[in-house]
Image (spheres, grey):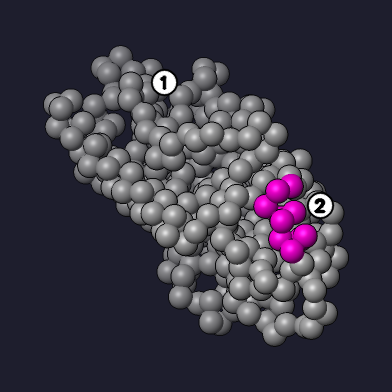
Amino acid sequence: MNISVLKPGLLTTVQDQGRFGYQQAGLVVSGALDAVALCTANLLVGNPETAAGLECTLRGPTLRFETDALLALTGADLAASINGQPVPTSRPVAVRAGTVLAFGAPPRGGRAYLAVAGGVAVPVVLGSRATYLRAALGGFQGRALRAGDELPVGEWSATGVRLFAALRPANLRGWAAASWWAHVTPPRAQPADALLVRALPGPEYEQFTPESQQNFWAQTFGVTTEADRMGCRLSSPALTRHTAAELLSSAVTFGTVQVPAGGQPIVLLADCQTTGGYPRLAQVISADLGRLAQALPGTRLRFQVITLAEAQALYLAQQQRLRALRSTIQLRLIYDK
């Protein structure tokens, strides 16, 4: 069972929930930038949450399924189509062998996730199938997909088999989508001019001048072209510290907001290094890391301060919604018998 890559898209990589346990050796976690979106896609096709899928950036790939498949698309709406027909997102979709999945221009957001029943079965490297591009580690041969690649697919779970059977009408000629869908991250009010992400003050927050502290929460930042899976540099009036003292390198992680000497903040993403010597002004909360996945160059970004207790409550609520989705899928299979 495999998937043929007809066109690779702008940047399509195999990702899972990341490579944990090696940060003390300097190895980055990597994994999906929007882990919740990939997790949701996996649940929709009956996979374990940790299964590997595809992360598609800005312009998605063109893929041909060589055997029958069950897939789900989440994250950004990249105008996906199957055999030329628009395909809905955030729901299971059954496709016949020979079906072609393609993507168009991105009307909203920048990164989409594709899960297939059985998961993308590339070799496990240090406990993960995630691609770390800078080290050519993991994923499909340690690199982004290219035309002509053949992606292996693993064994389906019993849930995946039942979901496919429930969707597959006798006269299915191309594909069929479920009438129901899942949105684990509920919509919330957003400023019209910017992507709003919530954050906590970082360990070196007090080293910044009161004016810079105030500006960080009040102003809108632009994501520059210096942006990749490692991090994105923001444009803004320079943020300044009231000390010139240099810092020892300290631990950083996905969502850490560092401020180099020039005063332009950098938000670290999934492929970030394990330590850094720049002052850590803030930390984006775990529940909003998926929003950063959509912060491509040109995006306007604004930070909102919240408390640690609020951040913990938001994370727990997000995990509860994932558990509820898993239970709902099982109940729906019973109901649809």
Tell me where residue 321 sits by quadrant: top left
* Quarter of the N terminus within the rendering: top left
Name the residue: 58% across, 26% down. Answer: 79
Does the rendering let one see residue 270? no
Report the front residue among 67 and 80: 80
**Which corner quadrant holds the C terminus?**
top left
- The span shown in magenta is 210-219
Does the CB distance between marks 2 and 1 fall below 8 Å? no
In the rendered view, does 292 fall on the left or right side of 175?
A: right
The stretch drawn in magenta includes residue 211: yes
Most extreme residue toward the top is 171
Spot occupied by residue 175 in the image (x, y as percentages of width and height): 40, 22
Crowd around label 1: few <14 · some 14–19 · many ≥20 (10 Å): some
Instruction: Name the residue rendered at 24%, 29% in the picture.
Output: 165
Of labels 2 and 1, the one closer to you: 2
Q: Residue at x 21, y 31 (%)?
A: 332
**Label 1 element class:** loop
Give the residue pinned by disc 1.
174
User: Is most of the magenta stretch helix, strand or loop?
Assistant: helix
Direction from residue 165 to residue 19 in the image, left or right: right
Residue 307 rendering spot, x and y as whole percentages: 49, 59
Looking at the image, which residue is at 46% across and 75% down?
A: 21
- The dot on residue 236 is 2
Pick the front one: 154 or 17: 17
